[in-house]
Image (tube, rainbow, N blue to C red):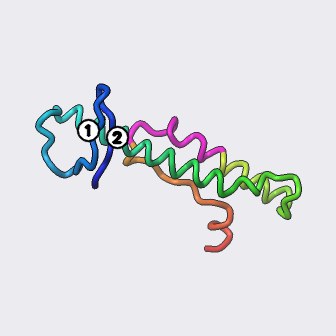
Amino acid sequence: MLIDFEYNGKKYMHFDTEQEWPEFTAEQKEQIIDLALFADIRAKRNRLLAESDYTQMPDSDLSDSEKLAWVAYRKELRMLPQNYTAATDVIWPISPFDAANK
């Protein structure tokens, strides 16, 4: 996987996570990769929240119970970064739309 990151004020572009990084210790490399993964998680989370904004509008065609399901889903999305210490452990919540269409 290629990642871009900033570390100690210096920008690094297209680092391959599978390769050796001579200027970083193994611990630093692990931390950098985790931070980059969490940045990707936050970006996806923000996109999913934006895509589901319509569910909370007063003129939405959703029933009250459907709206509540979306409220719970959106709350889980907002809590993702706080609920996990390792980006590789993140389990994405299933949207009410996807749950209803299984």
Would residue 13 be found to the left or right of residue 94 on screen? Answer: left
Location of residue 10 in the rendering, given as x and y in whole percent from the top left corner = 28, 31
Q: Between marks 2 and 1, how big is the CA–CA gap?
A: 6 Å
Instruction: Please identify the quadrant where the N terminus is shown.
Output: bottom left
Would residue 93 be found to the left or right of residue 90 on screen? Answer: right
Location of residue 52 in the rendering, given as x and y in whole percent from the top left corner = 69, 56
Amino acid type of the residue that numbered disc 2 sits on in the rendered structure: Asp
Residue range (magenta):
75-86
Question: Any mark on residue 34, and which?
Answer: 2
Which residue position holds label 1? 30
User: Which residue does the image show at 47% across and 47% down from the upper left?
Assistant: 41
Residue in the foreground of this view, choosing between 70 and 46: 46
User: Which residue does the image show at 63% across and 60% down from the upper left?
Assistant: 95
Location of residue 34 in the rendering, given as x and y in whole percent from the top left corner = 34, 40
User: Which residue does the image show at 32% across and 45% down from the upper left?
Assistant: 4
How crowded is the residue under tag 2: few (<14 C-alpha within 10 Å), some, or many (20+)?
A: some
Q: What secondary structure do most residues of the magenta stretch adopt?
A: helix
